[in-house]
Image (cartoon, rainbow, N blue to C red):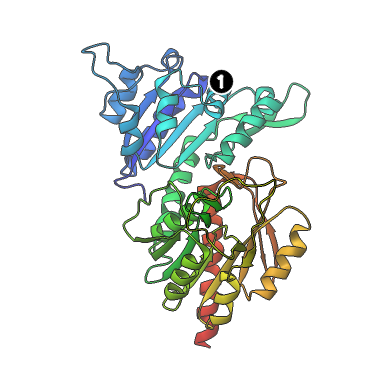
Amino acid sequence: MLKGKKIVLGITGSIAAYKACLIIRGLVKAGAEVQVVITPAGKEFITPITLSALTQKPVVSEFFSQRDGTWNSHVALGLWADAMLIAPCTASTLGKMANGVADNMLITTYLSMKAPVFIAPAMDLDMYAHPSTQQNLDRLRSFGNQIIEPQSGFLASGLEGKGRMEEPEKIVARLDAFFQERERAEGQLAGKRILITAGPTYEKIDPVRFIGNYSSGKMGFALAEECARRGAEVTLVAGPVALKTEHPSIRRIDVESCLQMHAAAVEAFANSDAAILCAAVADFRPGEVAAQKIKRVGETLDIHLVPNPDIAADLGQRKQERQVLVGFALETNDEQRNAEHKLEKKKLDFIVLNSLRNEGTCFKSDENQISILSKSGMKDYEKKSKKAVAADIVDELCATLSSKNKQSSL
């Protein structure tokens, strides 16, 4: 599945740099187009001339070409590639990637990369085992990068550890398997219509004030892009957010209040195969909205609130046997018990649980840490990017839709 794929190969200053030649040969043999980006330290271990001869492309190392001053655009490389592979990747480069230290062409290319990134660490076994290296690896995993685990050996203490870069043929096979799986996944939702709600709702108090929350909509928009990538026709009902959609198969409906989101969701759900209710919807709204800006008069201001419709519960009552309904639960305490109650009460097929106790997730963050609860039990997931979390949720959605289709055909 590597035929026609565009791969950026990053090479760093490791003795394993010579193995990059074997990686290039494997990728090119499989039909891939390879562009090498090498660090200055990497050139101490292998020459750009050797690499260029294998790829039939000039090797990129500096921001500007020493020959004619041409600017090498890391942004263009990030848009060009179908994947980026950094092999070998030293401890130094891992640290720079994890912390955004953009002091060479390879790191700036990584930071601009729109495609999946694979990292093949290569270093002394004790260096790999060091807590700082492991912390950087965990951080990179949370960004959605895929780590190609190194081979085992023996630490200075005599215990077994890892550090030696995986063999080139296995690295190439890992990329090939990834593209095979992605091609399979891209057709999983072909012909399916998916409703997704995202972002906050704003409930007006007067013309200039509202009741709202901190939701950025990032999780819902990531879910919309993932469903569309897998072939679905997506209706995205979005509260007031500053995000944009990218995939052409996403039809966006912008709303402001819960009542508007409720109306749009009910209408779209009737013709949907599934709905993922990711929006942070206000439970209450002011009973009356002032026509003019409320002036500061007196020491207190009382606002009478009335309940908003429960979108999840309403769709649960309307759900047909063929449809899948997915809810979200953001909790601050008794997380599992509260999520299980919502799962049952609102007739959800499964519910995605996240907690404000998990620092650096939820509102405004680019990361999330979830559990998925269904009648069959609960699955816990590691903290990772919301894009990667979206893939986990859509995997569960696909499995649930497939199960329902099998049941209906019996």
Task: Identify the residue at the far front of this view.
Answer: 298
Mark 1: amino acid: Ser
- List x then y, in percent, for residue 192: 41, 71
Q: Is residue 259 visible?
A: yes
Between 248 and 53, the one lying in front of the other is 248
* Image label count: 1
Residue 402 horizontal side relative to residue 136, left or right = left
Question: Which of 36 and 222 lies nearest the eye of the viewer?
Answer: 222
Residue under the image location 40 percent in, 40 percent down: 114
The residue under label 1 is 92
**Does residue 410 lie above or below 33 as drawn?**
below
Q: Which x, y percent locates residue 183?
A: 39, 57
Query: Does dot 1 land on a helix, a strand or a loop?
Result: helix
Horizontal and vertical percent position of residue 290: 52, 58
Give whichever of 265, 39 is nearer the camera. 265
Relative to 261, say whether 136 is above or below.
above
Q: Which residue sits at x=70%, y=63%?
A: 378
Indicate the quadrant where residue 64 lies.
top left
**Residue located at (34% from left, 61% from top):** 249
Relative image position of residue 390 (x, y in whole percent)? 52, 54
Report the residue at 77% width, 54% height from top. 333
